[in-house]
Amino acid sequence: MVKSVILTLEADVERKQILQYWNERNHSNNYSKKLDKVFRANFNMLASFPKMGKSLGINDLRVLVVKDYLFVYREIEEFVEIISIWDSRRDPNKLKTRFK
């Protein structure tokens, strides 16, 4: 069963910040457009296969690795909720404390 994928406000802000970072760093939006397509393709995969990510063992949260980013999400009845899009190069302790 294909589910809907929704991003929390925080996850959507994180996605936009990531794309904006690459726009500013590269002085172009070419890479950020490609990255956003990769993000959206993975959102669609999660809609079809919500259990494809690894369980975090915390509040039914799962994580999917996409390039250098971690999609933290949970499956709720008829949709998949993306809670965070975390750059894996950031301090992992901040991610751990965020979801405890």
Image: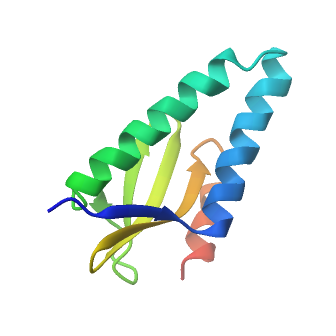
The x and y percentages for residue 19 are 70, 36
Residue 73 visible to an observer of this rendering: yes
* Placement of 58 over or under 31, stated as above or below: below
Left or right: residue 83 compared with residue 77:
right
Identify the image quadrant of residue 62. Answer: bottom left
Colour basis? rainbow
Q: Nearer the viewer, residue 80 or 72?
A: 80
* Placement of 6 over or under 61, stated as above or below: above
The x and y percentages for residue 75 are 32, 73
The total number of labels drawn is 0
Q: Quadrant of the C terminus?
A: bottom right
The x and y percentages for residue 47 are 29, 56
Q: Give the residue displayed 60% in from the left and 64% down from the top.
A: 95
The x and y percentages for residue 69 are 53, 43
Q: Quadrant of the N terminus?
A: bottom left
Q: Nearer the viewer, residue 30 or 88?
A: 30
Q: Give the residue displayed 37% in from the left and 51% down from the top.
A: 64
Question: Extreme left residue here?
Answer: 1
Q: Give the residue displayed 56% in from the left and 69% down from the top.
A: 96
* Placement of 82 over or under 23, stated as above or below: below
Residue 93 visible to an observer of this rendering: no
